Structure formats: structure tokens, C-alpha cells
Image: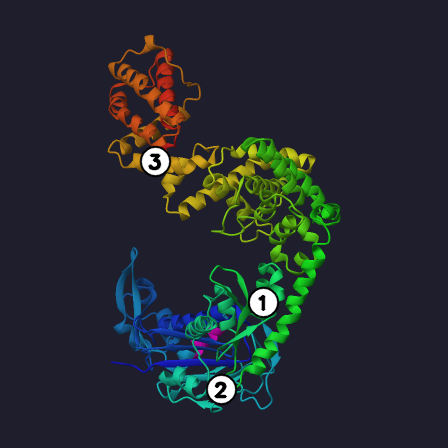
Amino acid sequence: MTHPNLLVELFVEELPPKALKKLGQAFGEVLLTQLRAQGLADAASLLTSYASPRRLAAHVTHVAPRAADKPVSQKLMPVSVGLDAAGNATPALVKKLAALGADASAAASLKRAQDGKAEALFYESVLPGATLADGLQKALLEAIAKLPIPKVMSYQLESGCELPGWTSVSFVRPAHGLVALHGGEVVPVQALGLVSGRETHGHRFEAAADPVVLKNADSYALQLEEEGAVIAGFEARRAEIARQLALAAEQVGGGAEPIQDDALLDEVTALVERPNVLVCGFEAEFLEVPQECLILTMKANQKYFPLLDAKGRLTNRFLVVSNIRPQDASAVTGGNERVVRPRLADAKFFFDQDRRKTLASRVPQLAKVVYHNKLGTQGERVERVRAIATAIAAEMGGADLIAQADQAALLAKTDLVTDMVGEFPELQGVMGRYYALHDGLPAPVADAIEDHYKPRFAGDELPRGPVGLAVALADKLETLVGMFGIGNLPTGDRDPFALRRHALGVVRMLIERDLPLRLSALVGIAAKAMGPLLTQADAQGQLLDFVYDRLAGLLREQGASAQEVDAVLGPRPERLAEVPKRLAAVRAFAQLPEAPALAAANKRIGNILKKSPEADAHVTTALLREPAELALYEAMRKIVPDADAKFDAGDYTASLQALAALRAPVDAFFDGVMVNAEEADLRLNRLGLLDSLHRAMNRVALLERLAG
């Protein structure tokens, strides 16, 4: 049997744009989940969510007017308690039946069933299915309660409200209408001081009818578009804006394209109900300002889409997404052009003013900027970063690199005290590069001033050159060691100093740029620069654990299995640049037929050695008596040096594959040799042989972690 579809809409005042998409999805999903839980919707029921600046709505297909009745079997009590020797109901059973609305005669029809060791009485009845009115009422209240509302507001209900006794309501925005249609019939429900009906409202100014009287649940989107001048669906409205943006850019010509920004597109989609893209412009003289400044002010302050030319350079044209479609749009375009002009003029003023002072002259101002109450000022921090950066540069290159890294580290934070970055903090680093080039500094230094913040987020690009890498590593390590050193560790979802991001940045730079740097040495360099500021015991050890944990998570995200990650990171490789090669070697080794047996043997050896702390990797050949231990020793003499040579050459795959030849002698050893011999010298010699084998097998990775 096919049931009608359901439409529920909350008509409200303008919703917060950055939360609208999630609000629309959550409203529909919770509504559907609750309807399914009550048997009013089934697995075949489909959800379509709608969200516009002034409405949240959900359309659910195949919704029953009433849920099916459910048979219920309720355990009452053990038979020995409910029935006497003659099989008649005891007073306890009669009382229990009365509580369920049944009389004593129902005792004869009770079902007996085994319940554990005893037999129990069960009362079987039929639970009537929920009506749509009752079920939707519950589902609607649940959907409202579970909305991910960023900030709740309270407001008074309008006078004449149909729900007497209500005085105020708490919701994301004041609600003014509620629609609930099952097919063409109104479902009587109440929420937020409103009673359901079939009337809603369209565009504030351009609706052809007000109110819009909905015919049925399925006509919602079409009627709103035709009569209300509103595109109700978030994704449909977003797609229409994207289409109009592309069309407007094409009409401008010259290969122009609107800037790609999904977050901006989502926000604008949440601001308009009837999108209309218009082309506007500004004076070309403003293009003398770095385009990042102009783009940021247009996007962040005005929600405009700047137009870029075919080479990715900013043009003096931009696109506005209007919420109205007048016949003559000149007033709209003119108004937006007048609004943006002061913003661009401010940016030009800041840029011109900032260039009157060199970055070097701003260094003393950093001593007045507090970085952290336990770690001092930005000026003090700069000196620490300089020390770390020059030490890293010394490991990476010669005197020129050291000098440029020192200069870049000295100036990297100076743009924080410029007017432009004061107005637009997002431009820190970017403006530093422009000002450094204006001051005549070398390009590698200027690039490093911008790049020392990179990578700023997952997937962000890395610093361009060695100077930027040295300063970026220094900046992140100073933050990590400093915060761990004062006990300011991230907890749960709280990470105010972005320590997880900094750790991943260090990991990515070391690996993706194949840097010949040791992780513990880098942490030690930073700790030395921090000096007596570090008050927490074992801060360096905690930080190393933290970095390896971040690396493990990154490898798993990239597709490595938990076993592979545990095996590779088990030996704590100091050069993180080696990790991808070690991971590839472990994967290749795991495909060999000898791998499972060797991994299991390795695990067995590890367990034996844990119980024998007196063992060391020393073997006396005269004490090798059994043929199997002699054979293993000889095999190791031939195979291990070859595996070690390949390991030292960085060919980890070949090193592990060479060790695969040890499978047969290892198996024979465990089959034919008693390790824990009664004679102490024999036992220690055999443990020494196993210790030598264990060390040789675990240089690339802890193979025992691959054992099932």
C-alpha cells in the first residue's frame, strides 16, 4: 500500500547563515529517524531537506497515517509465584493483571516460557500503533530539541497566541509559522507556540502571493518558487548561484573566473532566497594594493566574489549575489560599488602607511606584544625562534642558509604590528613578504617570512625553500616545546594553540621534503633555546610521544593498516623522512610467503627475551652444540651482514627480503633446540643468539607487530 508524503516546515526570522546548512540537514534527519522509530516511516522513505534564510523544512515520502499494531510479550513473574498448587492465580498475579487493565480471568491465557532456570508467566497483548498526529508531534519536538543551534535566543510570543499560558519561547530565531501536510491534509501538531496549518510565506518583496497556500506536501518547492519567488532547497539554490556566477564571468570575458571558495558560496547561499548575480567594478588604481588584501576585504566584509583573470590575477570587477531581481539593477550595482570603495581605500591607506617603515625598524615593538604569560613577549619568542632556526639551518646547509634563516626568523613576526595585519589578521605572513620585498630583502628571506606559518591546515602547501623550512620548523618547535614545557597540553577537543596542527606540520615537512634531520635532536635544540622556561619534567619525552601519535594517525588516514603503522613506528625511527620507505618495505615483506612464520617467530623471541633480562647479543661458537643452532648461526653470518648493508644504504625493502631466507633455520631452531637449557652457559648463549637475531630482524620495523 502506498502512503502519502509528509511535509513539515518551520517559518522563522533570518537564521544564522553559517549554521543554516547544518540546521536544515539536522532538522530533516532527526524528523525521519523519529518517524521510523515509531513505525510511521520505513526504510524506503526518502528525505528531502529544505533550508533558506527564513525556513527549515523536510519532505518525507511514504508516511503512514498510523503505525502498525505491535504484539507485546511482558514478563510478569515466576510461575511458582503467580499460580498456587491448584493452578489458580495468586493475589500477587491478580494485582499485577489489574495494573495492566486485565482481570483475574486473564490468568488462564497467560503464556508459560522458560526464563533462565525457572518457568515464568508472560502476558501477551497488542500495543496500538501511533497515529501520525501523535507520532509527528513527538518527532517534531525531538527535531527542534536536537537542532545544532549555535546560540539560543528567548522571545515573547505574539499576543493572541492560540496556546494559552505560553509566555516565552527559546529557539534559534523567532518562529512565525508551522506547516504540517500529509498529502493534502493538515496534521494537527504544535511547536514553539504555533499551531500547524498549510500557509507559508515567500520572498519579503517579490512573492506573487502572500501567504502561499500549499496544496499538498509534494507541491511545496514548486509553489514556493512560482508563487513565493523562493528557491527553498539549499543545494538547489547553491547550484543556481554557481551557475549564475559562471555565466556572469563569461559575459565579462577575458577569461575571467570568480574566485573559488566553497565556504563563501555556502554562506551566500544561506543569505539569499532568490539569487541574482550582478557584475560590479571598482577603480583600477586599487589594484596597486596586494590582491590578497582586496580579495579578503571583499569576501569577508561584503560577501562578494572577486573576478580573477586567466592568469589568476585580480581584476577590478567583482560579482554580487543580490536577493532581488529588479528590472533595472543599476541602483543595486551602484550601491554595492559605493559600499566597497571605502573598504578598498582603507586597504590602500594601510598598505601605503605600512611601507613607510621597514620591517627591521618594527622589531623593538614586538617586545611590547605579550605572547604568553609564562613564555614572555613576541620579542623574546623571536630570539628563541632565531636560535632554533639557525641551528636547524646549520644541519641543512652552509653559512648563507644560516644567515638568511636568522634574518627571516628575526623579521617573521614584525608584520603583526602593521596596520594591515591589525585590520586583517588572516594576512599575517602574506603582508610580511610584500613588505620585505619592498625593503629590498632577498626573495628567499621574503618567501620564508610568509611561509613560516605553513602548513596552516591539512593539505596546505609547504614552505617553498630551505630558508622557509628552517624557520617554519623553528617556529612550530618553539611553540610545541614551550607549551609542553609549561604543561599546556591539548585535551580532548581543546587545542587553543593548535599543537596538533603544529606537530603534523613538523611531520609533513620532515617527510615530504626528505630532510636529513633527527626528530629528538630537533626537540633538544628547541628545549635548549627555551632554557629555564621549561618547568615540566619529561616535557621532551611527552612531546616525542605526541608527535609519533600524530604521525601514526596521519599514516592511518593515508591508508596504512594499524599493524603496519605499529610495526614501522615501533622502533621510533629518528629520521621521519625514512618512514614512507620503511612502510613500503613492510608492505612488500608482508606479501612474502615466509612473512607470517617470521613475524610469529619474532614475537616468540621477543616474549622469551622479555623474561630473560640477562640476555645480550653475544654468541660463543664453542657453545653451539645442537645442529639446528649451528645452522641458524651460520645462516645469520651469511644473511645478516647483507641485510645490514642494504639497511645502511637505505634499501629497506631489500633488507627485509634478505631476512626472509632465515625462515627455515629459525623454524628448525625452535623445533630442535631447548632455549632454557639447565646449563647456564648454554642457556645464555642461546639467548644471545636469539637476541642477535631479534636485533637484526627489527631494524626496519618491529616484525612481531605483523603477527596475527
Q: For residue 555: magenta? A: no
- Identify the residue position indicated by label 2 in the image: 201
Q: Residue 586, labelled with which disc?
A: 3
Mark before the other along the chain sequence, 1 or 3: 1
Tell which tag, 1 or 3, sits nearer the viewer.
1
Q: Up-down: is 384 above or below 352?
A: above
Classify residue 343 by image quadrant. Answer: bottom right
Q: Nearer the viewer, residue 406 or 376?
A: 406
* Residue 251 position within the rendered picture, expressed as x and y whole percent measured from the top left: 45, 73
Residue type indicated by callout 1: Met
Q: Secondary structure at mark 3?
A: helix
Tell which tag, 1 or 2, sits nearer the viewer.
1
State whether residue 111 appears in this view: yes
Residue span colored magenta: 137-144
Residue type indicated by callout 2: His
Q: Secondary structure at mark 2?
A: loop
Mark before the other along the chain sequence, 2 or 3: 2
* Residue drawn 31% across the image and 72% down it: 42
Q: Residues within 10 Å of mark 1 (few under 14, many from 20)?
A: some
4 relative position to 490: left or right: left
Residue type indicated by callout 3: Val
